[in-house]
Amino acid sequence: MKLKLKVWRQKNAGDKGRFENYSIDEVSADMSFLEMLDLVNEQLLAQGKDAIAFDHDCREGICGACSLMINGIAHGPEAATTACQLHMRHFEDGSELCIEPWRAAAFPIVKDLVTDRSAFDRIIQAGGFISTNTGGAQDANNVLVSKTDSDKAMDAAACIGCGACVAACKNASAMLFVSAKVAHLALLPQGKLERSQRVLAMVGQMEREGFGGCTNTLECEAVCPKSISVTNIAMLNREFIKAALLTEES
Amino acid sequence: MLGQKSTVRLTLGYKLLMAATGLILVGFLLAHLCGNLLLFAGAEAINQYALKLREYPLLLWLARGVLLLSVCGHIYAGIKLSLLNKKARPQAYAKAKRVKAGFASQSMLLSGLIVLFFIVYHLAHFTFKWTHRAMFQFLDEHDVYSMVLLSFKSPWVTGFYVLSVILLMVHLYHGIRSIFQTLGLNHPKYNLAIKIFGQSLSVLLAFGFLTLPLSVFFKFLE
C-alpha cells in the first residue's frame, strides 16, 4: 500500500520544529506502525538524510516506549493498542497520516517524535514504591490478598507509563497515570502502610512537574493502551482527600 | 524516603474547591427552581414567598454570603485551572481528535462564562432592577409576579434566558457527574446511576427553569 506521511521534525529541544511530508510505497498491511516508520527511515538514510527519531523498545506493547500521536489520536485509531502493536491493515491504501510527538510542557521534545518522559520516573521516585526490608523471601501465602482487590490492583498495575493519557488530555493532565500507581499500591496490604504519605508525595511531584488538572473528560481512558479506568482517578481523589485531611505525619 | 512534605498541590486543590462550590451552587439551583415554580400557583403565592424570604434577613444574608463565596470560589478555581492547564500544553496539536470526550466536557469554560454573564444580567434585571427600570416603574417593589410577566413578553429577554438556561444545562450535564468523580465518590455498583442522575438532573433543572419564561411568552400565564 501507498501512504502519504506528515511527520513532525525537530532537531532538538531548542529548535522550533516543522512538519515534513513523505510519500512511501510498498508498505505491507502486515507491518506494524513502527516497521512502517523503519521503512521510511531506510529510504531517508539511503538518500543521505537524517532518519526520523522515535521511541521504541519491546515492540510487544508492554514497555511503554512508543509514543506517537497518529492522526490526532494517541497510539492511533485502534482501542487498547500501542503504536507498536498497531498494524497497517487498519489504514486504507493512499491514506494521509499525520504523526506528532506527545505535546505537554512536562514532556519536552528531545528530537522529532521523541519526548523526555522522565517526569513520570520522578513521580514514581517520589512515592510509587513500598519500603520493605530485604532478606529471605517469606512464604508466598503469608500475606493474604482478596481476589477482588488483587484483580483491581492488577488492572491498575497494567499501566505501562507510556504517557498517552497526558498526550490525549486537553489539559495534559497526568492524573490517570498517577492514579493507576496510587491505586495499585493502596489496594494491596504491602502498600497500605504508606498510602497517605505516598499519595501526598506523588501528587506533590505531579504538580511540580507542571501537568495540568483533570477535567474528567474521560479522553485518557479512551486512548489508554492498557484500558486503565478513570475509576482509579476517583480513588486517587479519595486517597488524597483522606490523606490531606487526616494524616498526622508531616 | 516517604513523608517529605510537599508544598505545591495546585490543580487537585483547585479541583476540590471547584467541586465543593459546584455542589453548593447545584443545591441553590434546586431551591431557586422550587421558589420559581410557585409562579404557577398564582401571584399571591410567589409574592408571599418573596416577602417571607425578607422576613428572615439574617438567614437570607447568610445564604447570600455562602452563595457569593461559592460563586467567587468557583470562578477563582476556574481561572486558576484554565491558566495552569494552558501552561501544561504550550503547543497545540496540528491534528487532534476526540475519542470519548463529549461537547459538554470540552466547553465548560465557554458555557461557564456565558452563564456568569447571565447571572450578572439576571441580578441586574430582577434583584437590583437596573435594566428594566421603565418597565417596572408602576409596580410594587415586591410584585414578583408582575415583574416576571412583564419581562418575558419581550422576545429578546425571553430568548436570552432560554439560551442561558440551555448553556447552564450543558455546563451541569458534565458538571454534576464531575463533582462525584472529583470528590472520589465512585463505585462500580453506582457509577451508571451517578451518570444518569447527573445528566437527568441537569436536563430536569433546565426544563424547570425554561417553563417560566416560555409559559409567559406563549401566554399560558397571564
Image (cartoon, coloured by chain):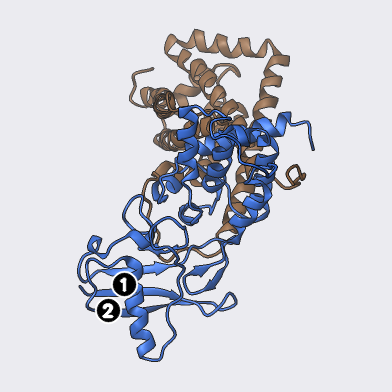
Chain colours: A blue, B brown
Residue at 46% of width from left, 55% of height from top? A164
**Residue A150 picture location, percent across and down:** 48, 33
Q: CA distance from mark 2 to mark 1?
A: 9 Å
Q: Quadrant of residue B40?
A: top left
Q: Secondary structure at mark 2?
A: strand
Q: Residues within 10 Å of mark 2 (few under 14, many from 20)?
A: some
Left or right, residue B165 beside residue B14: left
Q: Are marks 2 and 1 in contact (CB under 8 Å)?
A: yes
Residue at 46% of width from left, 25% of height from top? B150
Residue A72: assigned label: none
Q: Secondary structure at mark 1?
A: helix
Residue at 41% of width from left, 34% of height from top? B162
What amino acid type should be assigned to the residue bearing mark 2? Ile
Residue at 58% of width from left, 47% of height from top? A213
What amino acid type should be assigned to the residue bearing mark 1? Met
Left or right, residue A116 beside residue A50: right
Q: Which residue is mark 1?
A: A36
> Which quadrant is the C terminus of chain B positioned in?
top left
Which residue, as the protein is rendered here, is positioned at the far bottom? A48
Q: Chain of mark 1?
A: A
Q: Is residue A168 visible?
A: yes
Q: Which of the pair A211/A162 is nearer the observer?
A: A162
Q: Which of the pair B172/A175 is nearer the observer?
A: A175
Q: Which of the pair B121/A110 is nearer the observer?
A: A110
Labels 2, 1: one chain: yes
**Residue B161 picture location, percent across and down:** 45, 34
Left or right, residue A221 beside residue B1: left
Q: Which of the pair A149/A126 is nearer the observer?
A: A149
Residue A24: assigned label: 2
Q: Chain of mark 2?
A: A
**Residue A197 picture location, percent across and down:** 70, 39
**Vertical relation: A160 (above or below) A198:** below
